[in-house]
Amino acid sequence: MIHQNWEQNTTIKQIKCMHTKAKKYKVNNVLTEGKTYNVKNETEEFYFVIDNTNRIAGFKKEYFEEV
């Protein structure tokens, strides 16, 4: 259950949201274009960040670029 402590993890790096044009999901409610987010965990396909709802969530890397 390591995912329960991700919000308290140290920040790995910072990323900037480049767009919120998702093909399948609505991400424009929880991400803001141009805003910088702290990465708490990362996989090959996803970044796990604290989104605009102040909860940790996983998003595809295609929405972001590294700062």
Image (tube, rainbow, N blue to C red):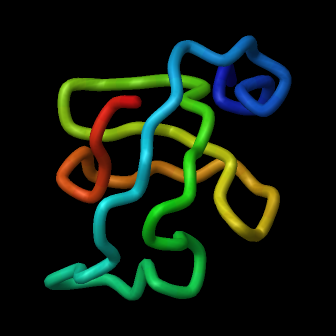
Q: Position of residue 17 (x, y in %)?
A: 40, 57
**Identity of the residue drawn at 40% across and 38% down:** 47
Is residue 65 found left or right of 14 in the rendered image? left
**Identity of the residue drawn at 65% across and 29% down:** 3
Q: Position of residue 46 (x, y in %)?
A: 31, 40
**Identity of the residue drawn at 32% across and 83% down:** 25
On the image, which quarter does residue 24 sit in?
bottom left
Is residue 18 found left or right of 15 in the rendered image? left
- Is 24 rendered above or below residue 30? below
**Identity of the residue drawn at 44% across and 37% down:** 15
Q: Quadrant of the N terminus?
A: top right
Is residue 41 found left or right of 42 in the rendered image? right
35 or 20: which is nearer to us?
Answer: 35
- Is 20 rendered above or below residue 4? below
Q: Position of residue 56 (x, y in %)?
A: 67, 48
Q: Quadrant of the C terminus?
A: top left
- Is 37 rendered above or below residue 21? above
- Is 33 rendered above or below residue 36? below
33 or 63: which is nearer to us?
Answer: 33
Q: Position of residue 51 (x, y in %)?
A: 65, 58
